[in-house]
Amino acid sequence: MIKAKRNGRSILFDWLFRNGWEKDRYGNFKKGNYRVKLQENSARYEFKNSLGKWQRLRSCYYSKLSINEDGQLCGLTL
């Protein structure tokens, strides 16, 4: 089970770097007003609302992540 978590996490890291996301000082990935917040077992896709607060749009466990034949991320829809 730990292997699946690491594999999904590394899949997400590689996909984010290839698609122009930048790592911030907290270890999360940002692109414009959006970020992917990395947690121990899951990742959250969030946007910054008009009040300046991060609001969750989607979340997914690392074990559910994969890349399809077209290079699109499956499991956490961005």
Image (cartoon, rainbow, N blue to C red):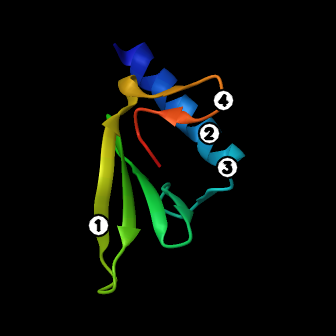
Write down the residue under mark 3: 19
Mark closer to the chain start, 4 or 2 = 2
**Cα distance between the residues tagged 4 and 1:** 29 Å
Kind of element beneath mark 3: loop
Q: Quadrant of residue 53?
A: bottom left
Mark closer to the chain start, 1 or 3 = 3
Q: Label 3 near label 2: C-beta < 8 Å? A: yes
Q: Residue at x 29, y 67 (%)?
A: 55
Q: Label 4 near label 3: C-beta < 8 Å? A: no
Mark closer to the chain start, 1 or 2 = 2
Q: Residue at x 53, y 35 (%)?
A: 73
Q: Residue furthest bottom?
A: 51
Write down the residue under mark 4: 70
**Amino acid type of the residue tagged 4 in the rendering:** Asp
Mark closer to the chain start, 3 or 4 = 3
**Cα distance between the residues tagged 3 and 4:** 13 Å
Q: Of the residues tagged 4 and 1, which is closer to the observer?
A: 4
Write down the residue under mark 2: 15
In the drawing, what numbered circle is on residue 55?
1
**Cα distance between the residues tagged 4 and 2:** 12 Å
Residue 18 visible in the current orientation: yes
Q: 10 Å neighbourhood of mark 2: few (<14), some, or many (≥20)?
A: some
Kind of element beneath mark 1: strand
**Cα distance between the residues tagged 1 and 3:** 22 Å
| Left or right side of 63 for 23 | right
Q: Residue at x 46, y 61 (%)?
A: 35
**Amino acid type of the residue tagged 2 in the rendering:** Trp
| Left or right side of 16 for 27 | left
Residue 74 in the image: state x and y as whole percent. 47, 32
Q: 10 Å neighbourhood of mark 3: few (<14), some, or many (≥20)?
A: few
